[in-house]
Amino acid sequence: MNNKIYQIIKSKNKKKLVCLTAYSKPIAKILDKLCDIVLVGDSLATAMYGMKNTHSVTLDTMIQHGVSVASSIKSAVCVVDMPAKSYKNVAIGKKNAKLIFKKTKCDAVKVECNGKNYDVISAIVKSGIPVMGHIGFTPQYYKKFKAQGLEEKDKIKLIEQAKKNEKAGVFSIVLECVSTSVAREITKLIKIPTIGIGASGYCDGQILVTDDMLGLSGFYPKFVKKFVNLNKIIEKGVQKYRNAVINNKFPTDKNTF
Ligand code: KIV
């Protein structure tokens, strides 16, 4: 097993894992200095490409962004999302995981769990590719947002899914919009780190979509905290540029040949 992945597993109960998404080289370079895990999330479909959900982002798009991000990552673990329909069965899942792994040179892939695809997850792990699991609100399988694990029957289902992911060999698992009590219970029950997004501070680590926490995306549901408002900062910069161009203050002799 890759030493970086081993360190993530070993960190359980020792430190909180800091995780964020990256879709491009400049962001990846910054995150590499500060994060344990950098995810090339299929959230790029909505955050970057303006699609209404993640359902139709292609394998080629994920690979293209994966190459850009992974080539800038040295110390963090770089995970690339397997897009919807790219792991429909064991053969297709193994083939596409291999393609992502080989072309991007990432450290691992992430597979959303639909409550049935443990054979696919296990086959990818057995083929030598580390897998990050993902349960709770799994955007590839839902049309509308809904917090998970609030009802008793859902709690039991989620705990079972977490255990089955662990048994299938995932090295960590994202819990998305899972109730606090279920996130706490799962984190206690399994030996691999849980990474929460809208899943309480009981998780072993946290992940957010970088564009959301930087105030770039305009998407701020309850579980997102805007740590800076980049929209405003960029707008100010563009306004300054606009004024300089209109008033013939840019370019000056300093900027010309
Ligand atoms: O696609 C993504 O960015 C994700 C994270 C939100 C966990 O899956």
Image: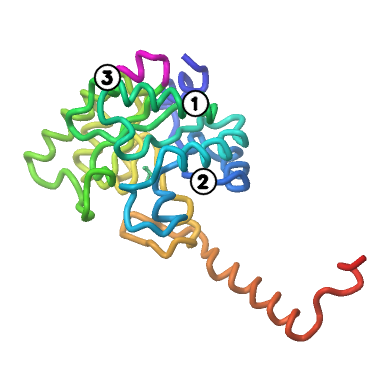
Label 1 SS: loop
Residue 128 placement: quadrant = top left
Return the residue at label 1.
107
What amino acid does circle 2 point to? Tyr
Q: Residue at x 31, y 19 (%)?
A: 169
Residue 19 in view here = no
* Front position in the image: 99 or 118: 99
What amino acid does circle 1 point to? Asp
Q: Which mark is residue 168?
A: 3
Residue 66, how many percent across, how many down?
Answer: 51, 37
Measure the C-alpha gap from mark 2 to mark 3: 28 Å
Image quadrant containing the C terminus? bottom right
Among the two numbered marks 1 and 2 on one chain, the one whose residue lies closer to the N terminus: 2
Q: Residue at x 46, y 33 (%)?
A: 79
Residue 40 in view here = yes
Q: Which quadrant contains ligand 1?
A: top left
Return the residue at label 2.
23
Residue 233 placement: quadrant = bottom right
**129 relative to 59, above or below:** above
Measure the C-alpha gap from mark 1 to mark 2: 15 Å
Q: Are marks 1 and 2 in contact (CB under 8 Å)?
A: no
Residue 73, how many percent across, how many down?
Answer: 59, 34
Residue 88, how many percent across, how many down?
Answer: 26, 31
Secondary structure mainly formed by the magenta segment: helix
* Front position in the image: 22 or 251: 251
Residue 133 placement: quadrant = top left
Q: Which mark is residue 207?
A: none
Range shown magenta: 122-129
What amino acid does circle 3 point to? Ala
Among the two numbered marks 2 and 3 on one chain, the one whose residue lies closer to the N terminus: 2
Q: Residue at x 34, y 45 (%)?
A: 197
